[in-house]
Amino acid sequence: MKAGEFRALPSEGNVVGVIEVSSKSTGNMLVEAYRKAAASGVSRLKEFRNPKIVLDCAYAGQAVAEGAYLSQYAYDKFIKKDAEEVEVVPEFKCLQKEYEGEFNKGKTIAECQNWARHLADTPANLKPPQQFVKIVEEKFKEVPQVKVVVRDENWIKNEKMNLFYSVAVGSDQPPRLLELHYKPQNAKNAEPIVLVGKGVTFDAGGISLKPSANMGLMKGDMGGAASVISTLLAIAKLNVPVNIVVLTPLTENLPSGKATKPGDLFVGRNGVSVEVDNTDAEGRMILADTLDYAHSFNPKLIIDVATLTGAMDVALGPLYSGVFCNDDELFSNLHKAGEETFDRVWRMPLDDQYKELMKTNVADMKNSGGRSGGSCTAAIFLKQFIKDKQKWAHIDMAGVMDVSGPSGYYKQKGMTGRPTRMLVNFIEDQSK
């Protein structure tokens, strides 16, 4: 058999599926091969409409579960089906009892990543900021040890989050800042890890209107928020002993008579003035004030995750998330987590010289440096809201936000939920 080839073998009324894993794969590549093999195998076995599929977990039980459950995701709740079209949703079981713990952990992580995919795939009219908050509140009833705090429009204004609010004013849907707190009694870190996720529930670009082609994908411009929230859900379900705060600024970015215009000027929560050069560079505006607010928790480290720039998609494509980081050890740990989960990251330059591209004669800086080095200028913009000596990483996951068709264990066109698995792995390591 060739690597990836599947064979179905009848056996006493059941079907045994065999799929070849490449003998050339080693280490993390081999684990990824098992993850993909499980996804492919269970997808083929579903054709036999068997209600139960038992998986061999003797090697990489967690990855096998991840592949199996990730491959079953589909956003199809609004598609009418005839009776014969209704799929049999199989129950997955681990063959070996001694590996059930690994398998169940992989199931939990995959299900949380699938929830991130669900959030991002949900049409924008079904998840404006207030509704998004309700969806999250309902989900987190599963983990009552997580405290959910919702900050409203007046709170945002009173906190002088003027950069954040400048994006929200174009929409009739009021903004929200969602906080989630998880601090079990056995938490290993007194100072929290703060995760910040960009939560633009629909991004039309504002007055700097985007082209209409593929604008519908901008329902997923809250993929960063979906990922960090789902990461916390997994961490809480796995009872990882770590102190975490999650912050997600939630808003739409729409054109209207009330919308912010190019040339407008706003002063951020930390006193930095910004001239709006491009209203479609909105993600950095809502993140900037939220990053400044994150310091109020005296964090051990801050990580923000965002579908921030199309330039990152151009630079790294669909394989790697780009990481801008001011601490070598922090990046090393993120890189390790990315390699172990095959939800990989690549370090990008965090060079203060990029700030020169955002010079203006009316404010401390503009919110855009133009097309050249677009991801790098966005990162340096955010750096102006990070205090000296504060460990921080900015993850631009715009390129890995979605897949345009079946790919590996992503069997449906749509959002990926990345980098949820990488973040879960990273935070688990931080708890040791």
Image (tube, rainbow, N blue to C red):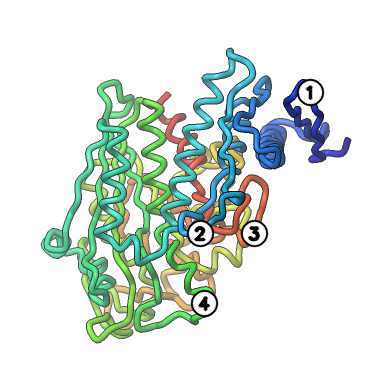
Mark 4–mark 3 distance (CA, rounded to whole Å): 28 Å
What is the residue that sits farthest to the right in this orientation?
1
Q: Amino acid at mark 2?
A: Ile
Q: Earlier in the sequence, mark 1 or mark 3?
A: 1
In the drawing, does residue 60 fall left or right of residue 136? right
Q: Of helix, strand and loop, which one carries label 2?
A: loop
Mark in the foreground, 3 or 2: 2
Q: Of helix, strand and loop, which one carries label 3?
A: loop
Instruction: Examine the image and state in which quarter residue 269 appears.
Output: bottom left
Q: Earlier in the sequence, mark 4 or mark 1?
A: 1
Q: Which residue is mark 4?
A: 371
Q: Which residue is mark 1?
A: 11
Q: Amino acid at mark 3?
A: Gly
Q: Nearer the viewer, residue 221 or 97?
A: 97
In the drawing, does residue 197 fall left or right of residue 354? left
Q: Of helix, strand and loop, which one carries label 1?
A: strand
Instruction: Examine the image and state in which quarter residue 278 appears.
Output: bottom left
Q: Earlier in the sequence, mark 1 or mark 2?
A: 1
Q: Nearer the viewer, residue 57 or 266?
A: 57
Q: Position of residue 390 (x, y in %)?
A: 33, 46
Q: Amino acid at mark 4?
A: Arg
Q: Is residue 191 visible?
A: no
